[in-house]
Image (cartoon, rainbow, N blue to C red):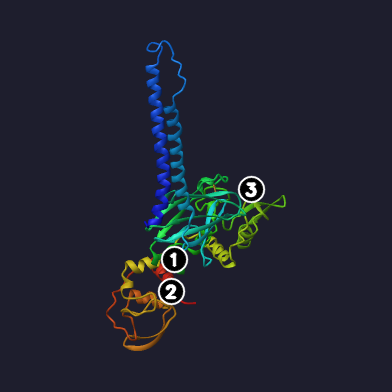
């Protein structure tokens, strides 16, 4: 960790340890003296109480020593406070928006995330606010805790230190899901952070719809596994009949595309029976994001990114050793834009024009030398007898490598 972080963290710890140490010493002294007095001045040992008029030395000491201690506490507290409040001028700025019951981090380029991704060894200043009630942004590892207040800007800063992850908690009671208002500070190497900013690489394993749900904090109130949180679970939600209340009237509606769009954009219009009207409309969700989410529900919430299974097969079977996925040439033709590519190939000793449709691709995987594409050598690729399911997954993977 860099010096100024260590500085702030150490100063907070010093203030704590100093106050704790002094308090402990005083507790110990008072207890010891009390016990000694009980013993020494009991009726048996001291039958006639002595009347003490005053003691200048004792009075001076018990005035001066505590005064010094209190000033020392103030000094430790003050320097620690200053270190926590003075963000370096070159700090990276991230906006923080708290809401019931999630954190949203907004970067300078407009990118948002529900986790606080930051590069290593970088001072980070958080400009914070809340869109509903008072929350409190708390990262114990960085010794920072700052209220987020609706209609007001507050700030905190920390130095990210080395690559690691730290807990973010809400430290101000804010309703039903207060205890679950958790997130993470994810400190990554600088190169990885740049990559994340440019491509969202850190979340590349997840399907787009899930990322949108996470980004807008939907999962804080709606579970994916059927359990009840605050709103209805997303599991098996699509294509059902539900009873809703519209202007006080009960009606049955089908949870199709149109219904879901409305439920996301204007949740108060129809409230599912048994639930309360407490969801904020997803005003910040773009039309594109909304579409991605609906597709995610419609497709049965497949938690794997499209083509992920096929990509794994291609890797495990060793295909990627000879076929690239980015259009570059290795040994065989690239998988990029392979589907429906027009080819000239040698087939049974003759040159033929073929289209690499799905049937051709499956045939080429099973019998690679049936067609040998012009410019490549035959007899190089072993034949693969994959199951229909694996074949399907591979084709799906290839289809994700196609430019629009
Ligand atoms: Cu937000 Cu407690």
Q: Where's residue 85, x and y in %? A: 49, 53
**How far separated are the C-alphas under marks 2 and 3?**
44 Å
* Residue 25, quarter of the rendered image: top left
Which residue does the numbered mark 3 point to in the structure image?
Answer: 276
Q: Nearer the viewer, residue 220 or 161?
A: 161
Q: Point out the tag, 1 or 2, that comes first from the N-terminus.
A: 1
Give the number of the mark in front: 2 or 3.
3
Mark 1 packing: few (<14 Cα in 10 Å), some, or many (20+)?
Answer: some
Give the number of the mark in front: 1 or 2.
1
Instruction: Identify the residue at horizontal 43%, vertical 47% (top origin).
Output: 12
Which residue does the numbered mark 2 point to in the structure image?
Answer: 401
- Number of labels in the image equals 3
| Quadrant in which the N terminus appears | bottom left
- Mark 3 residue element: loop
Q: Where's residue 366, x and y in %? A: 34, 74
Q: Nearer the viewer, residue 196 or 256?
A: 196
Q: Point out the tag, 1 or 3, that comes first from the N-terminus.
A: 1
Which residue does the numbered mark 1 point to in the structure image?
Answer: 196
Q: Is residue 111 left or right of residue 315?
A: right
Residue 236 seen in render: no
Q: Which mark is residue 402?
A: none
* Residue 312, quarter of the rendered image: bottom left
Mark 3 packing: few (<14 Cα in 10 Å), some, or many (20+)?
Answer: few
**How far separated are the C-alphas under marks 1 and 2?**
21 Å
Residue 286 seen in render: yes
Give the number of the mark in front: 1 or 3.
1
Instruction: Identify the residue at horizontal 56%, vertical 45% (top origin).
Output: 176
Discs 2, 3 touching: Cβ within 8 Å: no
């Amino acid at each position: 960790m860099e010096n100024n972080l260590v500085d702030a963290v150490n100063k907070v710890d010093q203030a704590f340890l100093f106050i704790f140490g002094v308090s402990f010493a005083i507790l110990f002294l008072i207890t010891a003296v009390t016990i000694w007095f009980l013993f020494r001045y009991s009726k048996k040992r001291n039958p006639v109480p002595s009347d003490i008029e005053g003691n200048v030395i004792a009075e001076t000491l018990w005035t001066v020593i505590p005064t010094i201690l209190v000033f020392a506490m103030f000094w430790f507290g003050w320097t620690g406070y200053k270190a926590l409040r003075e963000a370096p001028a070159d700090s990276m700025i991230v906006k923080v928006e708290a809401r019931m019951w999630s954190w949203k981090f907004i970067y300078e380029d407009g990118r948002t995330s529900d986790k606080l991704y930051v590069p290593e060894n970088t001072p980070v200043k958080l400009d914070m606010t809340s869109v509903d009630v008072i929350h409190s942004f708390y990262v114990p590892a960085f010794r920072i805790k700052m209220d987020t207040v609706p209609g007001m800007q507050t700030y905190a800063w920390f130095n990210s230190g080395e690559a690691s992850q730290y807990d973010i908690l809400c430290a101000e009671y804010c309703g039903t899901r207060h205890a679950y208002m958790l997130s993470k500070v994810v400190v990554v190497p600088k190169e990885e952070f740049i990559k994340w900013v440019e491509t969202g690489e850190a979340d590349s394993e997840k399907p787009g719809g899930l990322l949108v749900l996470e980004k807008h904090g939907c999962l804080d109130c709606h579970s994916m596994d059927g359990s009840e949180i605050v709103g209805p679970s997303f599991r098996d939600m699509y294509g059902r009949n539900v009873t809703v209340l519209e202007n006080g009237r009960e009606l049955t509606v089908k949870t199709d595309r149109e219904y879901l769009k409305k439920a996301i954009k204007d949740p108060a219009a129809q409230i599912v029976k048994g639930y309360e009207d407490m969801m904020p409309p997803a005003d910040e969700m773009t039309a594109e994001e909304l579409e991605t989410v609906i597709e995610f529900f419609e497709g049965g919430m497949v938690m794997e990114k499209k083509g992920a299974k096929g990509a794994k097969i291609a890797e495990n079977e060793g295909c990627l050793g000879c076929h690239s996925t980015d259009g570059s040439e290795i040994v065989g033709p690239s998988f990029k834009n392979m589907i429906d590519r027009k080819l000239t190939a040698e087939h049974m000793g003759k040159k033929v024009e073929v289209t690499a449709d799905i049937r051709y691709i499956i045939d080429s995987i099973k019998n690679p030398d049936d067609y040998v594409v012009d410019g490549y050598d035959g007899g190089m690729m072993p034949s693969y007898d994959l199951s229909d399911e694996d074949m399907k997954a591979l084709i799906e993977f290839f289809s994700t490598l196609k430019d629009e």
